[in-house]
Image (cartoon, rainbow, N blue to C red):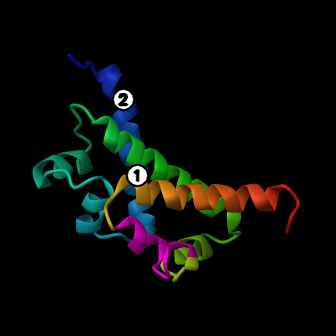
């Protein structure tokens, strides 16, 4: 399939948002690659430069999970620092690993589990069960 610039714009935006999140979370490039499903280094570097020819569905789903995790953390914690620190704290929901370490196991299921955990926390709080 041939992609036009208009077709690639959502991919470029998604990657730009993701890399902004990674910078805020202070995640090094090696770990960013793991979270994105271990793309080849040259592919990753082109993404970082804003060059995109296409993105696999797997990568788009991973980006979606991480954007949802970011959104939920910002909704659950009043201060950005608290939200970012939560990623690094041991959590019994992830076998006492931090959410970040759990996600860095590299499987999409780990990203999904962290996202669903935070969705449930958000739902619980917003339902008036605090």
The crowd level at tag 2 (other Cα within 10 Å; few <14, some 14-19, many 20+) is few
Q: Earlier in the sequence, mark 1 or mark 2?
A: 2
Mark 1 lies on a secondary structure that is: helix
Locate residue 38, reporting x and y percent: 22, 55
Q: Which mark is residue 105?
A: none
Q: Which mark is residue 9?
A: 2
106 over 12 or under it: above or below = below
Locate residue 122, reporting x and y percent: 71, 58
The crowd level at tag 1 (other Cα within 10 Å; few <14, some 14-19, many 20+) is many
Marks 1 and 2, how far apart in space? Answer: 14 Å
Locate residue 41, reporting x and y percent: 13, 55
Q: Which mark is residue 18?
A: 1
Q: Residue at x 27, y 36 (%)?
A: 56
Q: Residue at x 84, y 55 (%)?
A: 127
The span picked out in magenta is 93-104
Give residue 130's quadrant in the image: bottom right
The N terminus, quarter of image: top left
């Amino acid at each position: 399939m041939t992609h036009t610039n208009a077709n690639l714009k959502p991919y470029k935006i998604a990657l730009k948002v993701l890399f902004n999140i990674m910078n805020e979370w202070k995640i090094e490039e090696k770990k960013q690659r793991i979270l994105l499903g271990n793309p080849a280094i040259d592919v990753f570097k082109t993404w970082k430069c804003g060059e995109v020819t296409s993105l696999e569905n797997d990568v788009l789903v991973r980006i979606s999970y991480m954007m949802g995790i970011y959104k939920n953390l910002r909704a659950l914690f009043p201060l950005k620092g608290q939200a970012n620190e939560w990623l690094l704290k041991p959590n019994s929901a992830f076998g006492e690993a931090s959410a970040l370490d759990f996600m860095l196991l590299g499987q999409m299921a780990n990203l999904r589990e962290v996202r669903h955990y935070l969705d449930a926390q958000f739902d619980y709080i917003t339902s008036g069960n605090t």
